[in-house]
Image (cartoon, helix red, strand yellow):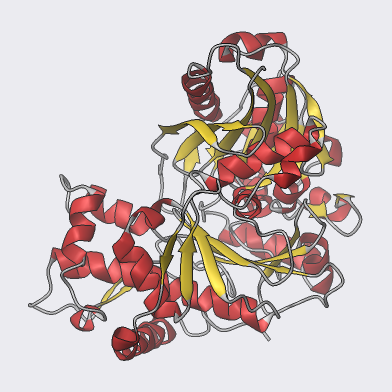
């Protein structure tokens, strides 16, 4: 009997992840991570040549497809992606400038102009975001129009990252609805590009491509891409979803009351509410789960574990993550008075305050590298506690936090998370959850409804972390210190807008 596999491509902030999963149960056969270094040519700017995303995709697909068993075949391709990042193409489909990455915060002036044009309650209901912010694609598109007029004059297409990769795969410019909404140019209530918002940044709806729901067919891989990738021409490519949504799907977040999240470059918490639930307000983002049609409520921080990457690469070069975290384990809960703020690129929910920055508060002569590492770990956990509070205020409780992402490899980090949250933290055996969720949606797009029977995780044992009551007082005091530092330096940044 021929073994069948689903290919998942996750377009992450620091790497393209590619996974090959058994079509029957979603068990990974092979995984690949193809890293890249983002360009930061000016303060607040974060960019990457779009061709690098494609080159890493090709390398990852070739690596995992080379591990197919004899007689095995790939039956579908599905996409998962970071939101907001976009590429600008000319009439020939070639990039006219580097892609602008979602954490880029250059467009503060343009944000005010865009918000004046389309902000308000109508904006929240259309986009699922409480108000325009610099994470969104829209103000950055307007920035290019204002500051690079010669470049903007050559722009024929503006594609969110998964739409750009779909174009390279199939020749068709198609975005999934979740990533389309991340631009702040898509009206989810109406089910199409929002003409007034699109016009406010100087574009026309046709320039943004077609929008498809996650789990629907984009098209088949064309001959040129098939040759580059080493795949069969015509292989079905499905619209996927934002990486956080894909990870939630892979971890079983498909029914109301479930609480899942990711601790990676960013930190995200997603809670599922019934489709008919009242609009939550309170600064959380609202999107739709492509499986079941329920509401997904999202709260997140823009920078989380990437602060440890920054610390490793720019402060204590020559140390591995494992070494740093092993040292951090020697420091008691509460970090002996040291507090870190992980917001290296502004605040996300609930305020989207771009002025917020990271740092360390309370440094003393007794503190060293291990304390700073520990403080980074704890700060990410404090951010998670804030995010879960927002989701709970919006009506989703959850009795456990099911989590994926790079930080889950550290038992030190996950135990700290359980202790700070005061709730069980479960890490399912679900390597590259976003990749797996993309693969599942790709199978659905190929007409393989049996993908809905994939279990949460791979069915193997998961790790579980239970709060330790003995350290609760130390973490409560540390969380209060974190809150006081944030409130003193950035008043209102953690408060929900009224």
Q: Is residue 256 visible?
A: yes
Residue 357 in percent (x, y) is at 40, 68
Residue 191 in percent (x, y) is at 89, 51
Q: Is residue 149 visible?
A: no
Q: Residue at x 44, y 53 (%)?
A: 265
Q: Nearer the viewer, residue 355 or 351?
A: 351
Placement of 64 over or under 247, stated as above or below: above
Residue furthest front in the image:
1
Snapshot quadrant of residue 206: top right
Q: Residue at x 50, y 36 (%)?
A: 17
Snapshot quadrant of residue 35: top left
Label count reads: 0
Q: Nearer the viewer, residue 245 or 36?
A: 245
Q: Decide if residue 15 is on the left or right side of residue 113.
A: left
Placement of 479 over or under 329, stated as above or below: below
Residue 140 in percent (x, y) is at 62, 49
Placement of 26 over or under 366, stated as above or below: above
Residue furthest right in the image:
190
Where the N terminus falls, by quadrant?
Answer: top right
Q: Residue at x 46, y 56 (%)?
A: 462
Q: Residue at x 35, y 87 (%)?
A: 469
Q: Nearer the viewer, residue 352 or 272?
A: 272
Residue 69 in percent (x, y) is at 53, 17
Q: Nearer the viewer, residue 378 or 207?
A: 378
Snapshot quadrant of residue 88: top right
Where the C terminus falls, by quadrant?
Answer: bottom right
Placement of 16 over or under 221, stated as above or below: below
Q: Decide if residue 84 is on the left or right side of residue 175.
A: left
């Amino acid at each position: 009997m021929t073994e069948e596999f689903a290919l998942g491509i996750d377009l992450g902030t620091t790497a393209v992840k590619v996974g090959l999963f058994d079509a029957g149960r979603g068990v990974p056969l092979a995984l690949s991570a193809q890293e890249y270094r983002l360009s930061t040519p000016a303060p607040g700017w974060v960019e990457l040549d779009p061709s690098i995303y494609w080159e890493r995709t090709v390398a990852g697909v070739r690596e995992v497809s080379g591990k197919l068993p004899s007689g095995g075949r790939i039956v579908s391709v599905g996409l998962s992606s970071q939101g907001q990042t976009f590429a600008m193409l000319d009439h020939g489909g070639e990039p006219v400038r580097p892609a602008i990455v979602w954490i880029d915060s250059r467009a503060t002036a343009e944000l005010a102009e865009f918000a004046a044009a389309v902000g308000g309650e109508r904006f929240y209901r259309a986009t699922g975001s409480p108000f325009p912010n610099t994470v969104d694609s829209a103000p950055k598109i307007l920035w290019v129009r204002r500051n690079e007029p010669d470049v903007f004059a050559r722009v024929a297409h503006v594609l969110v990252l998964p739409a750009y990769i779909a174009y390279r795969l199939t020749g068709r410019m198609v975005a999934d609805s979740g990533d389309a909404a991340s631009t702040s140019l898509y009206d989810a209530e109406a089910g199409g590009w929002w003409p007034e918002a699109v016009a406010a940044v100087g574009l026309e709806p046709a320039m943004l491509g077609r929008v498809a729901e996650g789990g629907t067919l984009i098209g088949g891989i064309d001959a040129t891409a098939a040759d580059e990738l080493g795949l069969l021409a015509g292989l079905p490519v499905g619209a996927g979803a934002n990486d956080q949504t894909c990870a939630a799907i892979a971890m079983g977040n498909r029914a109301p009351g479930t609480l899942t999240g990711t601790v990676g470059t960013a930190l995200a918490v997603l809670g599922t509410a019934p489709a008919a639930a009242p609009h939550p307000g309170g600064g959380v983002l609202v999107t739709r789960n492509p499986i079941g049609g329920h509401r997904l409520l999202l709260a997140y921080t823009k920078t989380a574990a990437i602060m440890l990457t920054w610390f490793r690469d720019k402060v204590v070069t020559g140390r591995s993550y494992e070494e740093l975290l092993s040292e951090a384990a020697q420091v008691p809960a509460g970090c002996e008075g040291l507090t870190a703020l992980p917001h290296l690129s502004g605040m996300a929910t609930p305020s989207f305050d771009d002025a917020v920055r990271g740092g360390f508060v309370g440094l003393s002569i007794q503190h060293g590298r291990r304390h700073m590492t520990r403080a980074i770990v704890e700060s990410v956990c404090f951010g998670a506690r804030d995010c879960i509070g927002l989701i709970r205020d919006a009506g989703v409780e959850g009795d456990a936090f099911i989590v994926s992402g790079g930080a889950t490899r550290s038992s030190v980090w996950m135990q700290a998370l359980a202790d700070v949250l005061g709730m069980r933290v479960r890490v399912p055996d679900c390597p590259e959850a976003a990749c797996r969720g993309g693969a599942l949606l790709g199978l659905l797009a190929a007409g393989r409804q049996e993908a809905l029977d994939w279990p949460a995780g791979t069915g193997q044992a998961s790790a579980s972390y239970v709060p330790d009551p003995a350290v609760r007082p130390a973490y409560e005091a540390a969380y209060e210190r974190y809150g006081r530092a944030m409130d003193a330096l950035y008043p209102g940044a953690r408060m929900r807008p009224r």
